[in-house]
Image: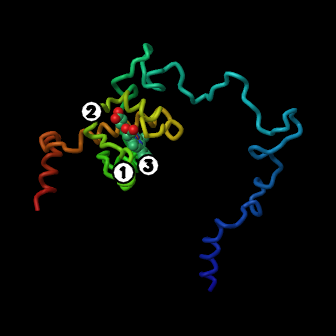
């Protein structure tokens, strides 16, 4: 019985109002959007001074932030180093943000696609116009019926998605000869019954 109570206690801990046990949550403070008569506008939240930019925001790098060079031309290469970490990030965000419509391997096969009769999401593997800079514009500003994903993905995450998309384009429909010799031997071994 005690064991059952203990397990129940652990399971229900998430449902309890934690302010009963956590004094920090009970301390006097202003929560976001609360009123505060101390300020003339009656609001607790302060407007940042004009022209303030977040410290994390990348500026003066249009090829990274806008996918365009200083002349305003769309870039044709990924402007940051393509590392394994970037690829892993790209896979994560491609699968969360893009695969729902364009399919897990980018071939346009998804449940959502079967329901989009007006203009189904195209395969991104055979699309002739999928240069990195163009895809960056599509993610940032949307394209036709596709919405912008600028609010969901910051510039680095967008380039990561593009790097992963390039890997998908190379891997889907790749020939055995495209693999390095050691990987080739491994693949042959795996495919033989
Ligand atoms: C809600 C479904 C949906 C999601 C999610 C989605 N797309 Fe799309 N996408 C579409 C549709 C529909 C089109 C075709 C739009 C048109 O032609 O009007 C499209 C078109 C495209 C194109 C082709 C543009 C061209 O030049 O032909 C690219 C590239 C693309 N999407 C990339 C992405 C990427 C990358 C993501 C993830 C960040 C993504 N899409 C997420 C539905 C989606």
Alpha-carbon span between mark 1 and mark 3: 15 Å
Q: Quick check: which quadrant has ligand 1?
A: top left
> Closer to us: mark 3 or mark 2?
2
Q: Is residue 109 visible?
A: yes
Question: On residue 170, which mark appears?
Answer: none
The percent coordinates of residue 146 (x first, y second) are: 43, 40
* Residue depicted at 50% across the width and 36% down the height: 150
Question: SS of the residue at dot 1?
Answer: helix
In the image, residue 118 sits, relative to residue 162, either above or below, namely: below
Alpha-carbon span between mark 2 and mark 1: 20 Å
- Residue with the mark numbered 3: 96
In primary-sequence order, the first of circles 1 and 3 is 3
In primary-sequence order, the first of circles 3 and 2 is 3
How packed is label 1: few (under 14 Cα within 10 Å), some, or many (20 or more)?
Answer: some
Judge from the rendering whether residue 132 lies leftward or rightward of residue 154; answer left or right: left
Question: On residue 128, which mark appears?
Answer: 2
> Closer to us: mark 1 or mark 3?
1
Question: SS of the residue at dot 2?
Answer: loop
The percent coordinates of residue 114 (x first, y second) are: 35, 54
User: In this view of the protein, which residue sits in the foreground, 26 or 61?
Assistant: 61
* Residue depicted at 70% across the width and 66% down the height: 16
Distance from mark 1 CB to nearest ligand 1 atom below 8 Å: yes
User: In this view of the protein, which residue sits in the foreground, 183 or 98?
Assistant: 98
- In the image as oriented, which residue stretches furthest toward the top? 71
Q: Is disc 2 in contact with disc 1, using a CB cutoff of under 8 Å? A: no
Question: SS of the residue at dot 3?
Answer: helix
Is the C terminus in the top left, top right, bottom left or bottom right quadrant?
bottom left
Alpha-carbon span between mark 3 and mark 2: 24 Å
Is the N terminus in the top left, top right, bottom left or bottom right quadrant?
bottom right
In the image, residue 167 sits, relative to residue 8, either above or below, namely: above
Question: On residue 113, which mark appears?
Answer: 1
């Amino acid at each position: 019985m005690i064991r059952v109570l203990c397990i129940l206690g652990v399971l229900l801990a998430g449902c309890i109002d934690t302010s009963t046990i956590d004094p920090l949550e009970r301390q006097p403070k202003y929560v976001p959007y609360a009123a505060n008569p101390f300020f003339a506008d009656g609001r607790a939240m302060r407007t940042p001074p004009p022209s303030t930019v977040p410290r994390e925001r990348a500026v003066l790098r249009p090829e990274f932030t806008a996918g365009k060079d200083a002349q305003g031309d769309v870039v044709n290469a990924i402007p940051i180093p393509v590392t394994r970490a970037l690829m892993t990030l790209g896979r994560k965000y491609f699968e969360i943000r893009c695969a729902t419509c364009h399919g897990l391997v980018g071939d346009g096969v998804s449940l959502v696609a079967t329901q989009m009769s007006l203009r189904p999401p195209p395969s991104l593997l055979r699309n002739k116009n999928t240069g990195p800079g163009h895809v960056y514009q599509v993610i940032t500003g949307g394209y036709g019926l596709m919405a912008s994903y600028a609010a969901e993905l910051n510039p680095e995450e967008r380039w990561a998605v593009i790097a992963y998309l390039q890997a998908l384009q190379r891997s889907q429909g790749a020939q055995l000869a495209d693999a390095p010799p050691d990987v080739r031997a491994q693949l042959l071994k795996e495919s033989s019954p």
